[in-house]
Image: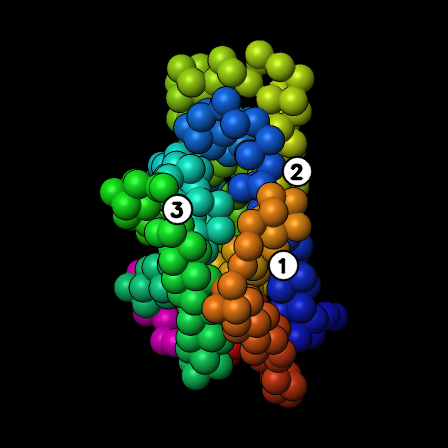
Amino acid sequence: MSSPSSHHLTGTVCVLLASLLWGTTGTAATFAPEVGPLAIGAVAMGAGGLLQALIAATSIRRERQRLRTQTGIVLLGALAVAAYPLAFYSSMHLAGVATGTVVSIGSAPLASALIERTADGHRLTPRWMAGAALGLTGTALLCAAKTTSASQGTESATGAVLGVCLGLIAGGTYALYSWTAHRLINKGITSPAAMGTIFGTGGVLLLPILLTTGAPLLTSWPNAAVGAYMALIPMFLGYVLFGHGLTHIPASTATTLSLLEPAVAALLAVLLLNEHLPTLAWTGIALVVACLAVLTTTDPAPQQTPNPTPTLDTL
């Protein structure tokens, strides 16, 4: 029988791999500049979500009775799934790739912890708070560095502020759909059925946005390739990994581990988009790495553990 530590490690690795894939989305979107952020978000999460539902169709059909008893949670998660990409990609469009990603993902752990504290009564352990503090400080430094760089250019201050606000909305909705997926899994629904139902329903909600704004995706092969990549790799594959991770670790831990995403986005912006990162930004990346080290190091498992799935109390 696998130990709690091995469960935690499996969940951690899955979420970190998903975060690596998600970190490529902002850079990938720049290769289709004529495609607007709403279209990018709709094709990424919409098509990716529908594909998840298709792959998980057998599991969804087999567990449909359990899913019906959780209709409210499913709808809440689907609404969050539909809102997240619209806010996230609009945030990157207005505030920049690195800043939009940092604000969106950096705010998610706080939102996730608040949700779990309010809905589930979980307390926050010193380890989690230390890791979150490091990660959030790092993302704040990244945000400050990118905002300072932007202020020296010609970008609109109003647009930057709106981008940051949309990033906060994205962080909240990301935390919310992570919590709903974890809630379904804790109710005995398998990860494929839970993720497929939530993301498939969210994908249906995004279809009108895609039909309204998605015409530029079909005007050239590069645009179509970007859309296909976004739907298949970071969204479909990434969220399959994320869903598997949620079977082993709580949503608040998963969203905190996702702080790897803005660090990856910033590095890709330097390497592929020729963006310059000042010392402050590199300091932020170092703190994000330190956050991951704190959260991925587990204590020796006790002799008897009643629940193999770790919670905030046992992290």
Seen as rendered, the residue at the extreme right is 1
- x and y percent of residue 230 in the render? 60, 33
The residue under the point 36% across, 76% down is 123
In-front residue for pair 5/297: 297
Q: Which residue is mark 2?
A: 233
Q: Which residue is mark 3?
A: 153
Q: Amino acid type of disc 1?
A: Leu
Query: Where 167 sits versus 248, above or below?
Result: above
- x and y percent of residue 202 in the render? 44, 32
Sequence-wise first label, 1 or 2? 1
Query: Where 310 sits versus 107, above or below?
Result: below
Q: Where does the N terminus fall, quadrant-wise?
A: bottom right
Q: Find numbered disc 3 in the image and state the secondary structure of the residue it sits on.
A: loop
| In-image side of 274 versus 138 (left or right) | right
Q: Are marks 1 and 3 in contact (CB under 8 Å)?
A: no
Query: Residues in magenta?
Result: 119-124
How much space separates mark 1 and mark 2, taking CA atoms?
14 Å
Q: Are marks 1 and 2 in contact (CB under 8 Å)?
A: no
Q: Amino acid type of disc 2?
A: Ile
The residue under the point 45% across, 20% down is 210
Query: Where 280 sits versus 226, above or below?
Result: below
Q: Is residue 271 magenta?
A: no
Q: Find numbered disc 2 in the image and state the secondary structure of the residue it sits on.
A: helix
Sequence-wise first label, 1 or 3? 1
Q: Residues within 10 Å of mark 2 (few under 14, many from 20)?
A: some
